[in-house]
Amino acid sequence: MFNQEYDVIVVGGGHAGSEAAAAAANLGAKTLLVTMNLQTIGQMSCNPAMGGIAKGQIVREIDALGGYSGIVTDKSAIQFKMLNLSKGPAMWSPRAQNDRSLFAQYWREMLEATPNLDFYQEMVKSLWMEKDKLVGVVTGLGQKIKAKSVVLTNGTFLNGLIHVGDKNFGGGRAGEKAATGITEQLVSLGFESGRMKTGTPPRVDGRSLDYSKMIEQPGDSNPQKFSYLDTTQPLKKQVSCHMTYTSPEVHDLLRDGFDRSPMFNGRIKSIGPRYCPSIEDKIHRFSERERHQLFVEPEGWNTVEVYVNGFSTSLPEEVQFTALRAVSGFENVKFFRPGYAIEYDYFFPTQLTYSLETKIIENLFFAGQINGTTGYEEAGSQGLIAGINAVKKIQSKPPLILKRDQAYIGVLIDDLITKGTEEPYRMFTSRAEYRMLLRQDNADQRLTKISHDIGLADPERLAACETKYSDSSSLISFLKKQSILPSEINSILDQKKSAKIKQSGKADKILSRPNIFLDDLKKCQSISSFIDSNNFSKEVQDQAEIQIKYSGYIEKEKANANKLNRLESVKIPKDFDYKKLKSISAEALEKLRKIKPETISQASRISGVSPNDISVLLVFMGR
């Protein structure tokens, strides 16, 4: 191992590192995954769930690109829900509750079954540099391992500091030590770093809870899955989650410990995730609210351990315990372990290019929480892109860059490197201006061909994708041509409080009506016969329905995307001297010189750069 050179070394075995290692190895690169503990590869450090609002779309995109997260999630799922079904399809978001142990187990098994991938258990303390050139990595024991490219996916481990009330100690995760050395070296090489914090709630003994006092949260009656492949079948059996609430009494008990909270007494100065605040932060910021939701989530099929979602905290253990016992259903709760907060180093993502390669050191890539993001899904997607581009870089091939109208992953990376972040970045549907195009149902159509062309998605995956969209096109074409008689449909329209038709009308026009769905049309013999005779899957039928009902919105977003993509083709030279632009604002000059946007379109999205500044830039470039 120590006397050979790897194509790619991936540092860290979390969600970003696992996807990066799988992608690099599957592209034929000789890859080494170095992590401090091989037993925690792919571990769910926080909640035992994948997906959710916008995050579910990202998991489906990872799967469409040939990543592993969707398959692992399906294999280890104990519950599945499609969120936001009462809204339009742009908002539908899949979410799975998972067996924490099985999730990590399947990740390990899939990685070990991946050709070209080696493993090594050790801490990487520094990069191996020779004359400002990246040569490989140096381990804590001083071993040097050569590599043509390196992907850093250190998660919360870089100088990690865990807080529980008055106490704090070094660690990257409960029971695991922090990683040291890398931050200091990178800063000495010219990188800018910062500190962030995140937190996790107590884990409790499910046998000590009274579920009769809580609201049951079952999975979908007809559960779906994440992966577009047929590697697993939808769940036949599911485990319920439950919901309960805090109360004014709980809030008062928690407030009694605020003076010992590291977040309020000044010991934690770094910024935590705005959209996943601690329970003490919620009480402080939303003091007018008398209660907050708590979701009681089982950790797996065969364990009594329970995750208390919504009760993330760094208060002293006894304060956590006393307050939680005042929650309905938790009167006799027993702790497995308390909640805690963790501070860690990250690097400002504006120091990266679209490929996730650093601007300062060639062939060095960052992915995951090191870039200021939070969440398994955000980390996994970055790892996948970094792993792909680490291989493409050493092969002297152009990088894979996804645009904002192609994927949530494209939105994520563009936001990070263009706008930066000073708080843990989490993906939301509201961040994507083309969310009607970036639905969870069509990630395969958007990305599988791209992945296949670079050698990641196999021919079977591409064939399945092409068959699905060929079938949906056939169904759409049929519905546009097929006429429905008033006698066939009027009783159905009447039941749905939709205006009756006086003469035969095309099926697609009737389907376009609000509150009318393909299942309604299937009550007509001509429609049901065509669908049944062609054996169209539920996915195909859903796709046809969405394309017809929302065609106007889809076409409008495509037109808007095409307009803006014209600016993507206007490249800005790497050595462009912005000081020549005398008419732009001082803020724009500072931001442009710091971020060095690659295109006019990227420049237009930088905070502080106005349309007038872009006009000046275009004129100066002769456009």
Image: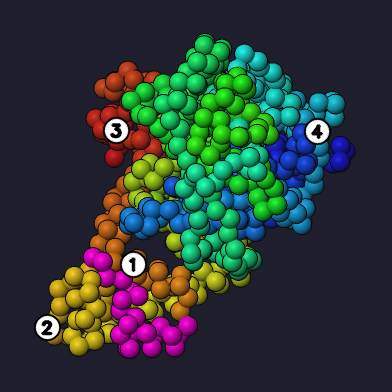
Circles 4 and 2 in contact, beta carbons < 8 Å: no
Whole-percent x and y of residue 600? 36, 38
Q: Quadrant of residue 332?
A: top right
Q: Give how far apart the Cα atoms at labels 4 and 3 are.
A: 48 Å
Please tell me how crowded label 2 is: few (under 14), some (14-19), or many (20+) other residues with Cα within 10 Å.
Answer: few
Amino acid marked by disc 3: Ile
Q: Quadrant of residue 185?
A: top right
Q: Is residue 207 above or below residue 589?
A: below
Question: Which residue is the site of mark 1?
Answer: 547
Q: Under tag 2, what secondary structure?
A: loop
Whole-percent x and y of residue 623? 29, 40
Sooner in the amino-acid sequence: mark 1 or mark 2? 2
Near-viewer residue (463 or 576):
463
Q: Assign the magenta stretch its main secondary structure.
A: helix
Whole-percent x and y of residue 104? 70, 47
Question: Which residue is the site of mark 2?
Answer: 502
Q: Residue at x 18, y 85 (%)?
A: 486
Sooner in the amino-acid sequence: mark 1 or mark 3? 1
Q: Give how far apart the Cα atoms at labels 3 and 2 are.
A: 55 Å
Can you tell which of label 1 and label 2 is closer to the viewer? 2
Can you tell which of label 1 and label 3 is closer to the viewer? 1
Sooner in the amino-acid sequence: mark 4 or mark 1? 4
Relative to 400, 119 lies left or right: right
- Identify the mark at residue 597; answer none if there is no mark: none
Magenta stretch holds residue 186? no
Q: Which contiguous range is marked in magenta?
A: 514-535
Magenta stretch holds residue 524? yes
Question: Which residue is the site of mark 4?
Answer: 122
Sooner in the amino-acid sequence: mark 3 or mark 2? 2
Q: Give how far apart the Cα atoms at labels 1 and 2 are.
A: 26 Å
